Amino acid sequence: MTRVLLPFPLQLTMADAIAPLLGARVGRLDWRHFPDGESLITIEDGLDGFDVALVASLRNPDELALPLRFAAATAREFGARSVGLIAPYLAYMRQDKRFNPGEAVSAPLFARFLEESFDWLLTADPHLHRNPELSKLYHIPVRRVATAPLIADWIRDNVANAVLIGPDSESGQWVSDIANRAGVPYQVLTKIRRGDRDVEVSLPSIDAARARAPVIIDDIASSGRTAIETLGHLRRLGLPPAICVVIHPVFAEDAYAQLLAAGPARVVSTDSIPHPSNAISLAGLLAQASIEMFEDASPKERW
């Protein structure tokens, strides 16, 4: 067995599920902090000739950035033949252009940062805006897996007579794909965002939703305001409480509590980020893609 997964603590369960599917073992990665806040990363030192992948969901990228680099560099020091990154949730995708004078364009900067440490990158449904493909942003081998088949299966198995609702135009690409796979109708709403926590969602056409169970689909729930507004509109239309399905459950601060207070029938998410709402496992999907990334791994020369 020449493949080793080194999971950050929150991804240990994910790594345990993936490892047997791709013929890998789960190695040791410990992360603790000194009293002054500095990180100490400790990994196993028997990695000579192994292909290694760190497993880390980047929900808190600023906190994880240096530990990621320390772990990758130390794995190479201990003889790893290649070092990849399995990041079910990939951060720093929104700032892909300069919206105001003086702003840093962080998406390509973060891409360069990861490229300096890793030979390849695997993620699930990154939030692409003006970059049509992840390969346009990253210059190392990258792959994104699509969660639509898994979400469609969950809806087909758990929600009778569903209608899918995308809370904004950006969600349309996921909603339409999931709806087609699940064999159910869908509609996409229009969103007006006035600030980080000030969002208004247009009224949908109610015809497609009558006598159906509404299912709100969103790729990332951070503040949760869009889903909360959508739940309110559907309730005012006289529809039953909607199920909220989220691909990446970021849920900053008290966003999850606020969403639950808005009265959804249920909140369901993939386990791209560990959260109480997790109900859809990505392990099989990530394992299959990881096999291909490991097989194609080609370590590059470093500075």
Image (spheres, grey):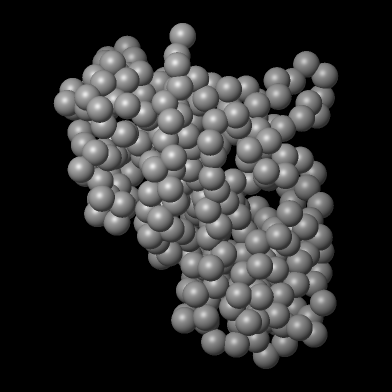
Q: Which residue is drawn at 62% across and 22% down?
A: 109
Depth order, front residue of 160/293: 293
Q: Residue at x 75, y 78 (%)?
A: 237
Looking at the image, is 210 positioned above or below residue 231?
below
Q: Residue at 25% x, 50% y: name it.
A: 23
- Say which quarter of the image contains residue 135: top right
State whether residue 197 is above or below residue 184. above
Residue 45 coordinates in the image, percent (x, y):
18, 23
Q: Residue at x 53, y 68 (%)?
A: 149
Does residue 32 appear in this view? Answer: no
> Where is 253 relative to 283, above or below?
above
Going by the image, does 160 lie left or right of 271? right
Q: Is 158 placed left or right of 190 in the picture?
A: left
Q: How many labels does the image show?
A: 0
Where is residue 46? Give x, y as percent: 17, 26
Residue 85 horizontal/vertical position (percent): 42, 36
Residue 90 image offset from top left, x and y in percent: 53, 40
Q: Nearer the viewer, residue 253 or 299?
A: 299
Q: In this view, does 44 lie above or below 168?
A: above
Residue most toward the top?
303
Give the farthest residue toward the bottom.
Answer: 211
On the question of residue 11 being in view, the answer is: yes
Quarter placement of the N terminus:
top left
Left or right, residue 108 beside residue 35: right
Question: Observer-nearest residue: 238 or 119?
Answer: 119
In this view, the residue in front, 158 or 131, is 131
Q: Residue 183's quadrant in the figure?
A: bottom right
